[in-house]
Amino acid sequence: MNTLSRNLAGLMLLASGIAAASPLPVATAQHGFKAEQAMAVAQTFKPGDIAAAGDHALYAYLNMAQFFPHQLVSRQGAVRVLSANPDAALGALRVTTALGDLSLDEMLAHPQTRVQGFIVLHQGAVVFERYPGMRPDDAHLWWSVAKLFAGLLTELLIDEGKIERQQNIVTYLPELAGSGWDGVRVEDVLNMASGVDAMDSVQGYMDRESGIGGLIYAEGVLTPAGHQPALGHDEALQRMRAVREPGTLYQYSSANTNVLGVLIERITGQRYADVVSQRIWAQLGAEGDGLMGMAPDGRAIAHGMFSSRLRDLARFGQLFTPSGRNPAVLPQVVQARMTDTSKRAHYETAEAAATAAQARLGERPVSALAQWDALFEDGDLYKSGFDGQALYVSPSRDVVVAMFSTSRDKTAYAYLRPLARAFPAGAAAPSSCIAGGGPRRRSQHCSSRP
C-alpha cells in the first residue's frame, strides 16, 4: 500500500467510524443491487463512507452521482469495438503474493482482494476479462486514475503552443500570485514536483486549515451533509504555501491536478468536463458516457471523481499503444514527452515513492511524468487509484491492463507487470474493428460485449 492509500484509508476510517472489512462480498454487485440494499445505503450514507472499503463504498463506487453532483462527459460516434481473442493461459499466470502463490484466476476469486472488474487487451483484442463484482455496463469510480486526463490535456495544450511548460503558473492563473504556487513552473505542477505544502496525508485531510485539507473540504468530499464548505475550491488553492524548491522532488498531491484543471479551463474557456469530452472521451469510441464529479462551487474534482465502464478505461489506455494510436487525440510527439525516461531528476530524489512503487509492482520505476505514478525503463506506464483502481500500459508490447476494485488489499497490483511481460515486445498491431463494419482479424471475433 503506498503512502496515499495508507493516509486516505486512515482518514476515512476516522471520518466515518466504519470498519474497513465489509460483510458483503463484491459478488453482491455482480448482478446489480437489490432495491432494499440501495435504500439502506442512501438512508445511512455520510461523507467519508465512499472510501471506507465497506458496504457503502461497494455501492457508492458504482453510483457516485447519487451522492455527489456530476457533469456528463459525453461519448460520440461509432463504438471502437474490441475484438475477442481470449487466452485461457493468462488466468493460470502465477505470482507469489502476501496471500500466497496464486494464479490470476485464484487471485480474482480470493475474498480478500475484492476486485470488481479486470481486463487485459493485447493488440486491441480482449484477451482476458472478468467481472467478479460489477456488471460490464456499470460506471465505476476511477479515483486518482482520472488524474491522467489533466496530464494529457496539459501536454496537448503545450504542444499546441497555448501553454509554455517553463512558464510560471501564475502567468496563466494570476489569482495564485503570492501563494505557494507563485514561481512554480507549469512543468513542475504537471510532474507532481510543485514544492507546495499540500501533500496528500491523513493529518492534512483531517485539518481543514492545512493545504490539502482545505481543498478536500472545499470539494465537499468530507463536508457534512447539509453544510456548505467554508472555502471555495480556488480559495483553497490560494491558501497553499511553498515548502521546497519547485522541480526538485516528486511528491504526490491532488492539488497539482486541480491546478491543472483550472489552468485547462482558463486556456480553453470551457468547463473541464467539456474539454475532457471533446478532446478525449468523444474520440475514444467509448461504449458509454463518463461522469465527472463537481465541487459545490462548480469546479471539477479533476484529481479523482470520474466514473466509466471498465472497457472504456481500457480504451483510454489503448491510446498509448500501437493498436489504439490516434494522432488526433494523442500525437506521437506528445506521447514521446510523456514517456521520456531521461526526465527523472525530480523522481531520483523521491525515495519513498520509488520504494513504494517497487513493493507494489515488483520493479523500481525510473520516473513519473504527466500525472502517471510510474514510468519504467522499458517505457511501460502505471497509474493507480485509491482502493484498488489501476491502469497499466505497455506501449512496446501493445498491452493494456485495467481494473476496478473496492479493496484495502493491494495484491492485484503485483500481476500488472507480469501480465504485460507475458507478451513479446515489438509485435505488429492488427487493424481494429469499428462497429457497423470494418476490418477484422481472421482469428478474432469483433464484439462490443464480453
Image: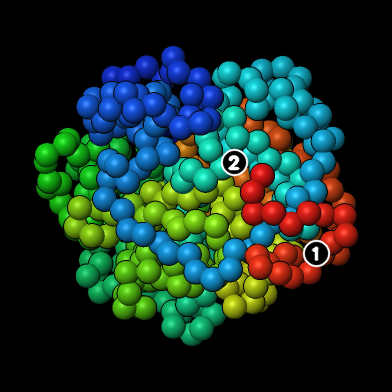
The C terminus, quarter of image: top right
Q: Would residue 293 appear left or right of 166 to someone viewing this image?
A: left
Say what amino acid the circle numbered 1 marks: Arg
- For the point 24% across and 25% down, the residue is 44
- Which residue was labeled with disc 1? 440
Residue count near mark 1 (Cα–Cα under 10 Å), binned few <14, some 14–19, many ≥20: some
Precedes in sequence: disc 1 or disc 2: 2
Residue 36, given in percent of the width and then of the height, sits at 32, 23
* SS category of the residue bearing label 2: strand
- For the point 65% across and 23% down, the residue is 109
Residue 95, given in percent of the width and then of the height, sits at 76, 27
The answer to whether residue 408 is above or below residue 279 is above
Q: CA distance from mark 1 to mark 2?
A: 26 Å
Rendered image quadrant of residue 290: bottom left
Residue 346, given in percent of the width and then of the height, sits at 55, 56
Residue 118, given in percent of the width and then of the height, sits at 63, 39
